[in-house]
Image: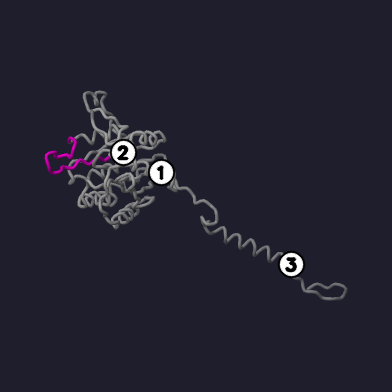
Amino acid sequence: MTTLFGQKFRRHRPKTQRLTRAFFMALTLLASYPCSPSAGVEPETLGVDLELVLAVDVSSSMSLSEQRIQRDGYVNAFRHADLARAIGLGARGTIAVSYLEWAGPNYQRVLVPWTTIGSYADARQFADALAIQPINNAQPGTSISGAILLAGELFSQSRTVAARRVIDISGDGPNNAGLPVAPIRDRLTGSGITINGLPVSLRRGGSNAFQSYGARYLDHYYEHCVIGGPDAFVIGIDDLNLIEVAIRQKLVREIAGLASRPKLASYLAGGQVFDCSMIGTTAR
């Protein structure tokens, strides 16, 4: 109470002071909530050790049963402890992976979008998400060029940043549809992307046990025309029973960033020569 000119008055805090305090309390509460992308704020970019696109051939030259075995190979690889250990070897202990299926030049579809994996539980969740995807009827054509072109575009859609970017492409034949593969390969590797290959040479019935080419043809074709970039390598498969082990070994090697083995200078001497700029490349 205050006496002024003989009158008593009750002292009040100014309303502006109460409003100011409430205003700052509201600001504090708002600051405690994460910003929404809809508010025009870009989400924070996550640093990872590796961005990896798995580009898997599902063209009509593979039966549904072969596709199932191939799919199970990737699913079981991500459920294996070796893969989680390889992820843990990285500086950040986290990678980002996307799974793409492809066939002809007009058939590429992403089954599992970019997913960050930083633990064994994360890897199993990725495997579970892949396992529930249906196996569709095989599509005609083998457009390796179309597959790696889309795979390269996927890197711009990731919300991560990595020191290494790798396309892991599997296929059971040479590029026989769409654009020539070599110019696209060169453009991607020129931007710092590594392309590794998993050529699958399965025995078929008929007079030629390996379709229209020899047993090692596809391995050499991938080495000359498909792979490229830092530490690029090929792991060939000629037995469907070994595909799961081969897929796991390849993924562990890619994730751990193990250097490829050097080849002797005489490696190409007397070997097949490929014109990689052609569609449906044949050895000469």
Q: Which residue lies under the disc numbered 3?
A: 14
The image quadrant of residue 194 is top left
Q: Residue at x 30, y 33 (%)?
A: 278
Q: Nearer the viewer, residue 155 or 123?
A: 155
The answer to whether the residues at label 3 and label 2 have Cβ atoms under 8 Å apart is no
Circle 1 SS class: helix
Image position of 224 with respect to 3: above or below: above
The image quadrant of residue 221 is top left
Task: Tell me, for residue 13, which label it has, or none.
Answer: none
Q: Amino acid at mark 3?
A: Pro
The answer to whether the residues at label 1 and label 3 have Cβ atoms under 8 Å apart is no
- Judge left or right: residue 159 versus residue 60: right
Please provide percent x and percent y for residue 260.
30, 34
* N-term-proximal mark, 1 vs 3: 3
Q: Amino acid at mark 2?
A: Asn
- Judge left or right: residue 46 versus residue 208: right
**Alpha carbon of mark 1 to alpha carbon of mark 3: how far?**
60 Å
Image position of 199 with respect to 101: above or below: above
Circle 3 SS class: loop
Please provide percent x and percent y for residue 102.
31, 47
Q: Which residue lies under the disc numbered 2?
A: 196
Asked whether residue 230 is drawn in magenta, I would say no
Please provide percent x and percent y for residue 206.
12, 42
Q: Which residue lies under the disc numbered 1?
A: 153
Please give the range of residues in magenta: 196-214
Q: Amino acid at mark 1?
A: Glu
- Categorize mark 3 by other alpha carbons within 10 Å: few (<14), some (14-19), many (20+): few
* N-term-proximal mark, 2 vs 1: 1
Q: Residue furthest right?
A: 5
**Alpha carbon of mark 2 to alpha carbon of mark 1: how far?**
17 Å
